[in-house]
Image (cartoon, rainbow, N blue to C red):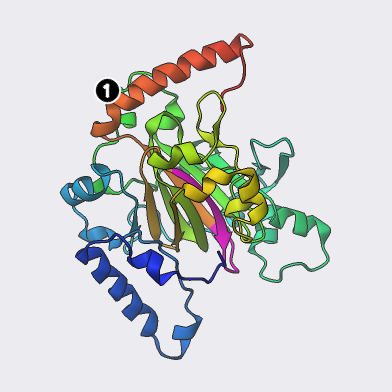
Amino acid sequence: DRDDEVDAFDAMMGIDADEFATLLDDAEDSSDGGEDADDAPKLHRGGVPVLDLPDVTPAEFHRRFLATRSPVVLRDVRRECAPAHLGCRHFRERYGDVVVPLDITDTNRRDVRLGDFLDAVASTSGSGGDEGADDLRCRYLRNLQMHEHFPAEAALLSLPRCFGENMLSNAGKVPRCPENWRRWFELFVCHPRCAGFPFLHKDTCHVHAASFQLEGRKRFTLFHPDDSAFLYPTGNTGCRSRIDPEAFGAGGTTSEILARFPALASARRVVCDVGAGEILFVPADWWHTARAIGTEVSVSVAASFVDAQGLEAFLDAYGEFEAMRSLVEHGAGVIT
C-alpha cells in the first residue's frame, strides 16, 4: 500500500447505512476547505467506521463494538482523553534531558537524551548528511510507561467514558496483575522513516487496546482473530507472528514474502489510518502492527483495558501468564 492510497472498494465493503453515511461526511469534509483542501492528508480507513466521540454513548459502544469485537475510530474532538498540548514540543521542553530507551525490546536497544531524539524526528528536512540524526529517525521510542517516566502527563490521560469500567483498575475484580497494567498508558514516537512496530502481534491476556494519536498520522494493519491460523503465530503464548514485518511496511507484501508465508494471502487485511485527535479501538485478540506515515513525526499513546464481558477470559489468561512466567524464571524458556 502506498501511503496516500485510498481504496474506495475496501472502504465500502461490509458496512451498514450509518457507517456509509459517516464515509460520505468524511468525503464532504475533505472537499470543503478552500484552496488548502487539496493539501489535506487523505486517510485510508479500510471500512473501519469513524464516529465523533461525544456522540457515542456507552450503550452504543457496547452494542456495536465491544459485544461484536469490532474496531472503530473515535474522533476526540474536544480532546477530553488526551490533551492537545501533549506532543513533541511539550516533551522536549519538559523532559529534554531525560534519558530514554529506543527500540526497548530489541537487541539493538539504544539509550539517548529525549531532546536529541525529538530534535531528530521532528525535523522535516529528511536526510541532511547527519548520520546520527538519520539513525535516530529510523529508531522507535515505544512502550514507554507514562506513569513511570511522565507521571504528570499520565494523570491527564483517560479512557473514553463510553468504554465503561476498566476491570484492570478494580483490585476487587482483578486482584493480581502488575500495577502498571491498572492504568496502562504507553508512549510511542517515531519518524515516518522508521519501519514501525517490529512485529505483527495481538496483545497478551485478551486485553483491548486503544491508540490515542496526539500528533502526525499512523497506519495500522489489522487482522481479525479468526484469521490467526494464516498469520504464523509463534512463541509460548502465540501472540507474535513470524511474518517478516516488511510485509506491512511501505513496500507492501511482495511475492517473495508470500513465497515464505503463503497462508498470509488468505488472511483478511484491514488497513486503517489514524490522525491527530483520533482514537483507534483495537478489540481483544485482533492482530495489529503500525507505522508512521506522511511527513510529520507520529506521537501516540497506547492504552489497554478489560471490559466486564472480557473479565473471565482475562483472569484465565493471566493465570496461565503467571504460570508461564514462573517456568521462565526457572529456566524453561522465554515468554513471547
Q: Amino acid at mark 1?
A: Lys
Q: Main secondary structure of the magenta part?
A: strand
Give the quadrant of the N terminus. bottom right
In the image, the segment drawn in magenta is: 287-298
Query: Is residue 296 part of the magenta span, yes or no?
Result: yes
Residue at horizontal 22 percent and vertical 50 percent from the top: 64
The picture places residue 48, in percent across and down from the top left corner, at: 35, 58
The picture places residue 83, in percent across and down from the top left corner, at: 40, 57
Left or right, 61 with reference to 322: left
| Above or below for 301 versus 250 | above
Residue 190 is at least partly visible in this image: yes
In this rendered view, identify the residue nearer to me: 222 or 207. 222
Give the quadrant of the C terminus. top right
The picture places residue 120, in percent across and down from the top left corner, at: 70, 60
Left or right, 59 with reference to 180: left
Query: Is residue 65 part of the magenta span, yes or no?
Result: no
